[in-house]
Amino acid sequence: MGQVIVDSLVRGSELALLAVGLTLVFGVLRFANIAQVEFATLGAYGMVLVASVAGVGILLQALIAIVAVGLLAVAVYRVVFVRLLRSSAAMAMIGSLALSILVRAVIQTVTGPDPKELDLPLERGVDIGGALVTPTQLRLVAISAVALAVLIAVLRLTPLGRSIRAVSANPELAAAAGINRKRITDVTWFIAGALGALAGVLLAMDTQVSLDMGFGLLLPVFAAALLGGLGSVGGAVAAAYLLALVENLVLKINFGSLVGGDGFVPVDYRAAVGFVMLVVVLLYRPQGLFGREARRA
Amino acid sequence: MPFRHAARRAVATAAVAALTVGLAACGSGDDSKSSAAQATPKVNPELKGQVTIGAVLPLTGASATIGKDQQRGIELAVDKINSGGGVLGKKLVVKVEDSEGQAASAVNAARKLVSVDKTPVVIGEYSSGNTIPIGQYLQQRKVVHINAGSSSPDIAKIGDFSFSVIGLDNIAGKFTAEKLVQAGYHKVAFLAPNNAYGTGLLKATRAALQQSGGQIVQSLLYTEGQSDYRQELQRLKSANADIVIYSAYGKEAATINKEAYQLGMDPRKFFGIYLTMCTTDSDPRAVDGQQGMDVNYIGPNGSAYKSAYEAKYGEGFRTSFSGYTYDAVTMAAKAINQAGSVDPAKIRDALATVGKRYEGVTGAISFDAHNQRSEQPYLIATMKDGKVSEEGEVRGPEA
């Protein structure tokens, strides 16, 4: 059981960072950015790149990659999505799918399809209450918890955060109150890009860097954002950890023992867990588990 | 304010530019530095014109390390042939295309070799999941296919244009099962990729184990290209088997071995099928003491090949697979000479004759009724300090 909790915290941290970025952008612009998960891929490859050209410590490598992807996210918004959003949110979403494919194609063309490893020492897991967890995984969970806490604090306590929430709640009213929507949108994209890149960097440190590392998370990230109620940051975080927990429970429980044998759900079906949860929630609670208001998209 | 606007746009542009340039730099990092050949024999100046055959290899992707080693075998064979009589009095050229380790790209590469370069023979690939579609395509186009790295038993079913110079897994599974049971391992857990190779290997190993008195208590076929294999490993761990038999492509195996180490699993309780494939990209500490089987690097007549390899690349064999592409090229060259033409159907018939008995650098090659190598020498090996060390027998569970 301890292992289930550890695995869920690791997985949940990765999903939460990406789901929050997705939900923030949705809040401000009312469109779901499929390319959000590619910010993770870009962050990880960015770190590989920084490591290969600059002799700086791992912390600085990660920071450079994260800031660069944040800026790239703003640029992508300005260049691509501003125009697409003029026609419709659906157009922007399709555009984001295309962008997602494009990002992977460009990375593959440039670096080749080989998975890459960051140059980190091999670690033995330490035993915590019967569960094995590596120091890197502990760091991963802690860093993402801190990042999410800071984000929530900024949203709740600072004027900038209030402006983001105001635009999210009612763009017209926010504009009437003198909030610069363009600036708020830029900031939101930067946060979404940076959080996505952070997820990618952490995932890279824990496992490896590969082309599909972001895209492979698309389904659970969308599931978490929708389960949490699109636009709700706290909801997305809670849903991400909950989804990770359910995924790991489903994979760990020996369903066969109910009928006196051995029968586990195949590991490949992990993505199906999020999908099933999503369908059930959409049927019975379309505003999401933690959403307060009716669906507005 | 126009000034601020311009400044922001500049920042955005710079970010895009930085990332693009940066990614470009990423790519140039890991290319092999060893291709500066020091000991290439001179091309015989009397050879006029050229004969081109093709090869499709995983030069990038999870099996890239092995693909590049396969390419070395080809280069050495070409050097050898062109320093002598060549092929039909002409220079032999082997055009190598990258499969990226993916079936779709592999077939595209084969298609290009056949339709653009008009090669009568195509060697390839490494992974059975890619070799079979290439073979089927070549069979349709009536072009000779030589498999020099894959081992799925399904390869024998491709057709009369398809040859294998490496033994298939019905032989490998039997060898592994017998050796493990002899050494005292009976309860076995199994992990392999979910593709033609993995399913074929599982079937062969399970059948052979049952015959020798062992059994598979947990079998898992993993989806290729995941970034994380912890769930699979935890299941293997909880199966409490005597030993884990596994097989995985270079870079995937690296992640699997790393995570097994993190989960406190003992590398000494792992047995790699095609051990050099499983360990070539792995952290040496994560695989220390790991046992495994592999195809023989070289046979009794292979010592000249070994020295040529070491002279040209300045290191010992990287994986066990380069000798097989070497044999594939030299056999193809001999068959083309015997056929006296580059017509694929004539080469096919000549190759079947050559393959009645051929002394390759990987040992004696003789084809069975389906043009598959009928005898394949294997070896048992252990990983010690990052090096493969050959052993006579499998180390028992108590040792």
Image: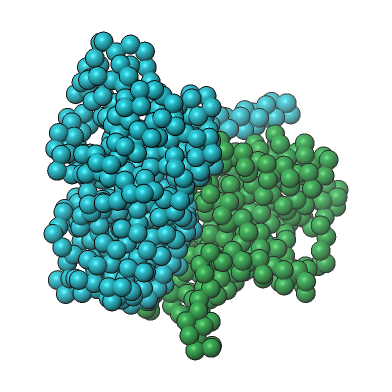
For residue B350, above or below residue B385: above
Q: Is residue A233 left or right of residue B175?
A: right
Q: Is residue B47 left or right of residue B18?
A: left
Which quadrant is the C terminus of chain B positioned in? bottom left
Q: Is residue B294 left or right of residue A20?
A: left
* Residue sitting at x 78%, y 74%: A284
Q: Is residue B308 left or right of residue B18?
A: left
Q: Image quadrant of residue B53?
A: top left
Nearest to the observer: residue A143 or residue A87: A87
Which quadrant is the N terminus of chain B positioned in? top right
Chain letter for the cyan colouring in the rendering: B
The spot of residue A126 in percent (x, y) is 33, 69
For residue A194, above or below residue A147: above
From where the camera sits, is residue A221 visible? Answer: yes
* Residue sitting at x 63%, y 49%: A36
The spot of residue B69 in percent (x, y) is 30, 38
Nearest to the observer: residue A170 or residue A123: A123
